[in-house]
Amino acid sequence: MSQGSNIRYGGLGGGCGWRLPGPQDAMDVPWSSPDSGSDGGEMISSRKDSLPSQNLEDSFFPFSSSSSQPRGSLMPPMAGKEPLGSSQDDDSRLLLERDLILAAEVGRALLERNEELTTQLEQRERDIEALQQEKHILQQRLDLLELEGSQREAELQADLTSLREQLDKQRSQGRDHRREESEQLTQLSNHNHRLVEQLAEAVALEHTLRSELRSLRDDMEDRSFSNSISSARLESLQAENRVLQERYARAEERLNSVQEDNARLRAEREGMRERVTELQSTLCEREAELDQERSTVFQLHTLNHSLKQRVQALGEEVSLTQTTCFPLSLQCEIQQSQAKEAILVHSKILQEKEAEIQKLKEELLIREGELQSLEEELQPFRQSPGQPSYSFLEAELTKVRQERDSLNQQLLNTIKHKVALSQEVDAWQEDMRLVICQQVQLREEERERERKASLQRGSATSRSLRVRGEGGKRGKGGFFSSFFSSD
């Protein structure tokens, strides 16, 4: 008998005393969660094999063993009541001892599982601290990038001002060139006008100035040569004007590209700020989900405590009902067999749910391994001198955060599923307790009806015997007299 079960036995003749683990024992050892389904089941099965003919069905229905007695023992003789009662007391004590041993083993397995869950919770807290440290590092990197962006913006502003000054200079030079060209054009036009006037005068004075014609022709040739020179100069000025216009267009294009780069850098900076706020909000949400997981763990502790109290109450009710109940009828045996089938079905369902939970745990371990491998892949990028761009690191970080969120969601779903299963088990145990109480009440009502029917039969037989006796006395001497009197 293990010392942790806290059970004391007296002799069979002197009665038995026991003590289940109470709240004082629960404060010394941390509570376990209902997640310890597989480990607790293996420990219970190993301890259960060492006990003599221990059975879960017998613990819930200890009076089912009495239903296997033959029907001939339902009506024992009146002389043999005392040894039958003593044998039933011995059986009830043995069954009660087995139930208490099984409850103690279950409590011990649950407590051991609770220690494992506390270690897992501490590991999760360490993971959260690591994530907070990583957040601090990313915040420092963001500050550095903002500082670089501000420096880049100042440099671009300086380049923009210098380009504007060059543009103003080129515009002023272009205005000067255009002014000179206009002045030259006006001069040439005036000169041409004077030449035309002189030609008109020469034609008019052709006959009078024939002697001066050659000189005038020489002058005209000189002036035509000067005109050709001025036209060549005009063409060169036009070519220079076209070159300046092209340079002006290129400068405008460069200015537009610089403005677009500035706008893009500002948009990237705003996006980075929004991303930081989003990361902070997601971190707050993860912390809230962690608090919710802690509250669900506390609820599971309370549910475990309530389950143990209900098991203790059911054991006491079974012990009380066993001392007052007689052997079961055929209908009760059928109901018990149906109850056993229901227990088997529920146990199968619980085993399937435990298998699903184990599968989800394995998937969680696989995802954690993938997360660790991704962190190892990111480690050389962080330590290398040629670091990747911030957008690549941000994409990897979002991918890791999404995987972590999915894992947390799966863990929450498994915890909710486990809580729902525990609630279903509680409801099923309550239904079975109600069924047992209803069976006991039906048995008592049937016994009362049988007693009343037997009393009514006895009174009816006594009345019929009295009526027959009185009729016989009347019929002995008065048959013919009654016949003639009727005539």
Image (tube, helix red, strand yellow):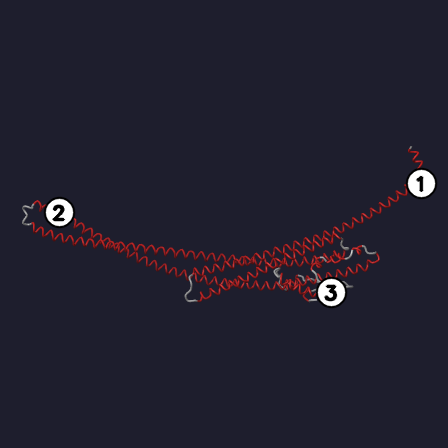
Find residue 9 and name its label. Answer: 3
Q: CB under 8 Å between callouts 3 and 1?
A: no
Query: Residue at position x 34%, y 59% from top?
Result: 156
> Could you tell me which secondary element the residue under label 1 belongs to?
loop
- Of the image marks 2 and 1, the number of the one nearer the N terminus: 2
> Could you tell me which secondary element the residue under label 3 belongs to?
loop
> What is the three-letter code of the residue carrying label 3?
Tyr
Residue 457 vs residue 485, the one in the foreground: 485
- Of the image marks 3 and 1, the number of the one nearer the N terminus: 3
> Could you tell me which secondary element the residue under label 2 belongs to?
helix
Q: Is residue 213 left or right of residue 26?
A: left
Q: Nearer the viewer, mark 2 or mark 1?
A: 1
Find residue 31 and name its label. Answer: none
Q: Residues within 10 Å of mark 2 (few under 14, many from 20)?
A: few
How far is the residue under mark 2 from the one under mark 1? 187 Å
> What is the three-letter code of the residue carrying label 2?
Val
**Mark 1 lies on residue:** 476
How far is the residue under mark 3 from the one under mark 2? 147 Å
Query: Where is residue 62, by image quadrant?
Result: bottom right
Query: Where is residue 116, by image quadrant?
Result: bottom right
**Mark 2 lies on residue:** 196
